[in-house]
Image (spheres, grey):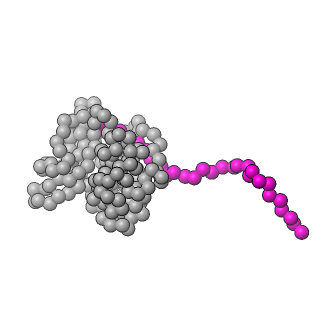
Amino acid sequence: MKHILFVTMILLGISNARAFTVESGYIQKLSGQYVKATKISCDASTGSYCQQICGEAGSCQRIEPYCRNCAGTTSPLLRQLFTELSRVFSIQQKVSDMQPLIGFLSGERYVLLDLNSIFNYYTPVGGEAFLNELTQFCGANANTALLAVSLDEVHQPQKLNYVLCRDNAGKTAAFDVSLRTPGMGFRLLKTQIYFNLN
């Protein structure tokens, strides 16, 4: 189900629509309750993305779903993301076909994590340790980086799907990520081994 919210922006801020931008923050509903939301902005060339994600061509906001076991230290995935991101994951390539990302953002099973995420129970929120990890992926614009994490059928963190970085013009670029794997392959031993079969 797609949610379109017309409420006062608290932390996301209202900005001019750029080519394609994704932001995450908190908004206050008319009831006074604060909820986590994703804001998508598009220009004329990317308006179809916003249309597919939430039915509006210019910009929209969507409430992110409840993330079960994100608030606390029970998720091994979140522990890896907040403490050893660049050691466990690597960027593969910039996403050139945006349709999988648009489909991902259109779904109801994701959460976006940023430098100031309230789900970071492992390092100081907004601190240098996590900022340094994000810098490995997004360089000088690490303070606006977003980690797009899919949720499983019961809304628990399942997988890091994308890293979203902003360029100097404010446009969002998405990168595929994968788990780092130790080097495998056949290597000759430097020391000979002799077997005595007596």
List the single residue furthest toward the front. 128
Total residue callouts: 0
Residue drawn where x is 51% and y is 51% of the image: 180
x, y percentage for residue 146? 33, 48
Q: Which residues are magenta?
A: 171-198
Residue drawn where x is 57% and y is 52% of the image: 182
Q: Does the magenta portion include 180?
A: yes
x, y percentage for residue 134? 38, 48
In this view of the protein, which residue sits in the foreground, 161 or 25?
25
The answer to whether residue 34 is visible is yes
x, y percentage for residue 68? 32, 65
Position of residue 8 in the picture relative to residue 60 (left or right): left
In this view of the protein, which residue sits in the foreground, 34 or 139?
139
List the single residue furthest toward the top. 45
Quadrant in which residue 142 is drawn: top left
| Above or below 17: residue 158 | below
Residue drawn where x is 40% and y is 61% of the image: 79
x, y percentage for residue 52? 28, 42
In this view of the protein, which residue sits in the foreground, 158 or 163?
163
Query: Magenta: predominant secondary structure element?
Result: loop
